[in-house]
Amino acid sequence: MTRVWGLAVVLVFCGGVAAAGLVYGGSPGAGVGFLVVFGVLAWVNSPLVFPRSVGVEEARRLGDADGRPVVFWRPGCTYCLRLRFRLGRRARELHWVDIWRDPAGAAAVRAANGGDETVPTVVVAGRAHVNPDPAWVREQLSRTR
């Protein structure tokens, strides 16, 4: 659990220290701005941005039942963030597996990527696609309707 929130906590701490230094140095406006920027960065790199993660077995079961893709991701991954934000509300229709919380999910990603934990890895109909274009993922979602 700490690993998942680690980056967000570090960002908040560093932003707080830097903001305190700016406020103490006589620039309260810059300090508040700095804290806001680091707070946003922490939020974006936290698990809160992504839909609820499920275990790999549950994701596979749900994906087989409804035909929706399974996305393997990890906090702090810029490519995962890009996919999440470009999908918008449709991201909630996918089955998300956080490989830092689910060792079996990490193993599945390594098996699909020749030993590498490259994310996002999107599995559609049993076939893995590494860092696919968000438009392609939306198209796969449209086929499940």
Image: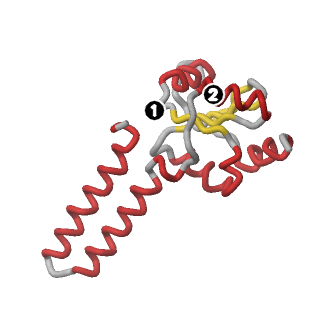
Which residue is disc 2 drawn over?
A: 58
Label 1 to label 2: alpha-carbon separation: 16 Å
Residue at 49% x, 28% y: name it: 102
Instruction: Kindly identify the residue that appears in the image at 74 percent across and 44 percent down.
Output: 137
Quarter-of-image position of residue 131: top right
Front position among marks 1 and 2? 2
Q: Is residue 142 left or right of residue 48?
A: right
Amino acid type, mark 1: Trp
User: Which of the numbered marks, if any, corresponds to residue 100?
Assistant: 1
Q: Residues within 10 Å of mark 1 (few under 14, many from 20)?
A: some
Residue count near mark 2 (Cα–Cα under 10 Å), binned few <14, some 14–19, many ≥20? few
SS at mark 2 in the image: helix
State which quarter of the image contains the C terminus: top right
**Disc nearer the start of the sequence (1/2):** 2
Residue at 68 percent of width and 56 percent of height: 89
The location of residue 49, given as percent across then percent down, is 52, 53
